Structure formats: structure tokens, C-alpha cells
Image: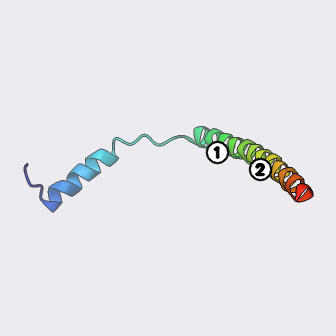
């Protein structure tokens, strides 16, 4: 494997960074809105599942305490 000098390394890094295509403002905004929507939906979903499991556990503990 050939060794790369620090100068050549930085030239390669500079050449690679020129290949980057940055998203435009509209694409960034659409992605941000989608992330907010999806995280909100997931938050509500997991809140509902957690509440359901909490209710089931309370019911089971209540049944177990009543039979002791």
C-alpha cells in the first residue's frame, strides 16, 4: 500500500469536498418538516402503546392483589 504525504492527503480531501452536492433550501425545509411530522407521529404512537401496557399491568396487579 502506497503511503500518502500530508500535502497529498489534503489535496485529495479538497478534491472530494468539491464533489459534494448540498441540498437546496426547499429540500432542507421539506426534510425538516417530514422529520417533525414523523417524530410527532412516533411520539403519539409510543405514548399510546405505553399507556396501554401501563393499563394492562395495573389490571393484572389489581387481579393478583385481589386474589391474595
Q: Left of 13 or right of it: where is 63?
A: right
In the picture, residue 27 is in which quadrant? top right
Q: Which mark, residue 17?
A: none
According to the image, label 1 marks what residue?
A: 32
Q: Which mark, residue 50?
A: 2
Q: Secondary structure at mark 2?
A: helix
How many other residues sit within 10 Å of disc 1, few (<14), some (14-19) or many (≥20)?
few
Q: Left of 13 or right of it: where is 34?
A: right
What residue sits 16% from the left and 61% below the top? 6
Q: Nearer the viewer, mark 1 or mark 2?
A: 2
Q: How is the image coloured?
A: rainbow
Given residues 39 and 66, the one toward you in this image is: 66
Q: Is residue 65 above or below residue 29?
A: below
Given residues 41 and 37, the one toward you in this image is: 41
Q: Residue 23 at x, y = what percent?
A: 51, 41
Q: Residue 10 at x, y = what percent?
A: 23, 57
Furthest residue toward left: 2
Q: Residue 56 at x, y = what percent?
A: 83, 48
Amino acid at each position: 500500500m502506497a503511503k500518502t504525504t500530508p500535502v497529498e492527503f489534503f489535496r485529495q480531501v479538497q478534491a472530494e469536498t468539491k464533489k459534494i452536492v448540498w441540498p437546496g433550501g426547499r429540500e432542507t425545509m421539506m426534510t425538516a418538516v417530514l422529520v417533525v411530522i414523523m417524530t410527532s407521529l412516533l411520539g403519539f404512537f409510543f405514548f399510546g402503546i405505553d399507556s396501554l401496557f401501563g393499563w394492562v399491568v395495573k389490571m393484572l396487579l389489581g387481579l393478583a392483589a385481589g386474589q391474595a
